[in-house]
Amino acid sequence: MKLLVPPPLVALTGAAIMWAVSNYLGGWHVAFPLQAIVAYALMAIGLALDGVSVFAFVKAKTTVTPLAPEKTSRLVSGGLYRFTRNPMYLGMLLILTGIAVLLGAPANILVLAGFVAYITHFQIKPEEERLEAMFGDEYRAYKRSVRRWL
């Protein structure tokens, strides 16, 4: 399967859908003390995960773009990649979770679940197939020792 949609665009679309759900569909909204602080903290952690993850790829001198996995020159398995095989996608999920908390619409949990399902099916699984074809036993061992998300 050829990957056509950049994951940041998928996340941005998810954020737009959450905004629309929160502002136009009405419904129940949740507010709690320190809500904005919790939301911005989640977003900041997500941005930090993404930044550190991209830096690891740059440092390893391999491609960051998931749209061209055939350009991958080496398997990155250190740093954050020791704990999750997909810290960039986890970072995007944390950013979206922060946005959902800030907006306070519980219905946005469905958007978060949709993001995870979409990224897992259309992005991560095809990436895993390509990486397994490229790196063989090294990648299979990595998959056995590190979880896909957390």
Image (cartoon, grey):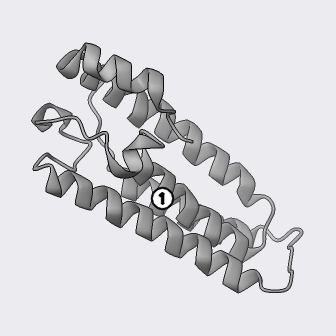
Q: Residue at x 33, y 46 (%)?
A: 5
- Left/right placement of residue 113 relative to residue 26 reads left
- Nearest the viewer among 132 and 9 is 132
- Give the percent coordinates (x, y) of residue 109: 73, 54
Name the secondary structure under disc 1.
Answer: helix
* Residue 113 placement: quadrant: top right
Q: Residue at x 43, y 62 (%)?
A: 49
Residue at the right extreme of this rendering: 28
**Number of numbered tags placed on the structure image:** 1
- Left/right placement of residue 128 relative to residue 23 reads left
Quadrant that contains the C terminus: top right
- Give the percent coordinates (x, y) of residue 48: 42, 69
Q: Which residue is under mark 1? A: 91
- Nearest the viewer among 75 and 103 is 75
- Give the percent coordinates (x, y) of residue 42: 60, 70
Quadrant that contains the N terminus: top left
Above or below, 140 relative to 107: above
- Left/right placement of residue 88 relative to residue 147 reads left
- Left/right placement of residue 69 relative to residue 35 reads left
Above or below, 56 relative to 19: above
Amino acid under disc 1: Gly
- Give the percent coordinates (x, y) of residue 149: 53, 40
Above or below, 54 relative to 83: below
